[in-house]
């Protein structure tokens, strides 16, 4: 018989294993107009995803402290889906790197 993990080890596991990546929230069609918002819970943390006046989608972590200002969370849209990253370190969505174009100066053979 296995014993359930204590709160400290469970929180540490959640912080290291699950919060360190990008997580799917919903489709962009869930917040179609400016001013629309969506409240979700990601690994026990409440997150608000909103569409601002410039039609940009932004995400904020709701702090549980009284009078705490919402903390911005990295948010990205890929293929019509909203992703958030709760990790404080700088992780980015993997995009293929395009090698820089090389210009070759050559003279034609007939010159």
Image: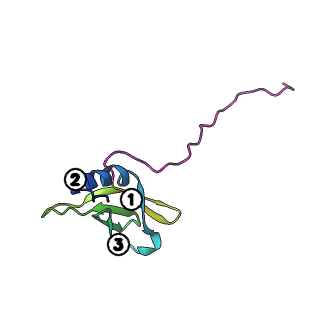
Residue 16 lies left or right of residue 63; in this view the side is right
Residue at 18% in and 63% down: 64
Residue tagged by mark 3?
Answer: 38
Work out whether 73 lies above or below 26.
Answer: above
Q: Name the residue located 31 percent from the left edge and 58 percent from the top edge.
A: 2
Q: Which quarter of the image is occupied by the N terminus?
A: bottom left
Q: Which residue is mark 2?
A: 8
* Vertical comparison of 86 with 96: above or below: below
Residue 89 lies in the magenta-colored region = yes
Residue 70 is covered by the magenta coloring: no
53 displayed left or right of 71: right
Q: Write the residue at 39% across / 59% down.
A: 84
Sequence-wise first label, 3 or 1: 3
- The Cα–Cα distance between marks 3 and 1, rounded to whole angstroms, is 13 Å
Residue at 26%, 55% (x, y): give it. Answer: 11
| Helix, strand or loop status at disc 3 | strand
Quadrant position of the C terminus in the picture? top right
């Amino acid at each position: 018989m296995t014993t359930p993990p204590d709160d400290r080890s469970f929180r540490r596991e959640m912080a290291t294993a699950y919060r360190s990546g990008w997580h799917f929230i919903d489709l962009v069609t869930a917040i179609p107009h400016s001013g629309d918002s969506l409240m979700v819970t990601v690994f026990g943390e409440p997150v608000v995803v909103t569409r601002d006046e410039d039609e940009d989608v932004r995400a904020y972590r709701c702090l549980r402290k009284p009078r705490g200002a919402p903390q911005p969370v990295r948010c990205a849209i890929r293929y019509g889906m909203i992703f958030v990253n709760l990790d404080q370190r700088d992780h980015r969505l993997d995009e293929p790197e395009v090698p820089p174009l090389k210009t070759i100066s050559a003279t034609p053979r007939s010159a």
